[in-house]
Image: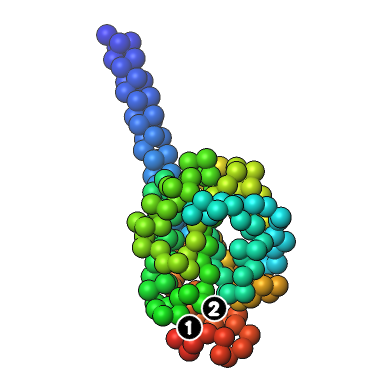
Amino acid sequence: MEIISRHFLLVALSILCLSTRAFCVEIEDANNIHSHHQMMMETKSRVADYKLPQIQLVREDGKQVSLLEELNDGRPLILNFIYTTCTTICPLTSQTFVELQDKLGNERDRIHMVSISIDPEQDTPEVLTKYAHKFGAGSQWQFYTGTLEASNAAQRAFDVYHGSKMKHSPVTFIRAAPGDSWLRIDGFAKVDEIMHSLGELSHSPGHLSGSLN
């Protein structure tokens, strides 16, 4: 009888240890996720130079275009990477672009906003067009897809390639003019932060209106 009781006690203790360990693991995982999200909310900015590759992408209107020519059209540039089935990061960064174009008002056509898909096999021009309509994108905000190789090359050029779309993180790139250095903002950039950066990066006082400062 004593042996049986001891056996049940050992089993109970084992279950308790396993349950406690599982509970602790769940808490640790939750803390890690919270810390990761907290890190993304805290932005870090740095100036960087990127060598743009000679690649062809496809705009949401179905036209095949040169990445270099699209980015070097003379306008200040704001760029990010997205994919349309994303349910976490991309809706937030796209909403920031919406708020940005709203805040720019009549001057928004003087800015080129670019979103490049990291899931080009899913994000066809038709899919990107629907995504653009969903967020009310203006004519200054254009979306790009293409081959998987071209998308990966673009990601590598901007040092955001992680091998899987599920590992992507929020990054915003800002450049005042072709040939200039880029400002890279890691994390969820706020509209005011982007507006301020545009003003700071602009070489001439009249390049953009005072509302950007």
Left or right, 28 with respect to 204, comes to: left
Q: Residue 195 in the image: state x and y as whole percent.
A: 48, 78
SS of the residue at dot 1? helix
> Which residue appears at 40% of the width and 63% of the height?
137
- Say if 118 sits above or below 47 in the image: above
Q: Residue 134 in the image: state x and y as whole percent.
A: 35, 56
Q: Which residue is mark 1?
A: 212
Crowd around label 1: few <14 · some 14–19 · many ≥20 (10 Å): some
> Which residue appears at 36% of the width and 63% of the height?
136
Crowd around label 2: few <14 · some 14–19 · many ≥20 (10 Å): many
Q: Nearer the viewer, residue 11 or 83?
A: 83
Label 2 – label 1 distance at C-alpha: 7 Å
Which disc, if any, is residue 198? 2
- Say if 159 sits above or below 213 in the image: above
- Say if 104 sits above or below 29 in the image: below
> Which amino acid does the dot numbered 2 rest on?
Leu
Q: Residue 41 in the image: state x and y as whole percent.
A: 45, 63
The mark total stands at: 2
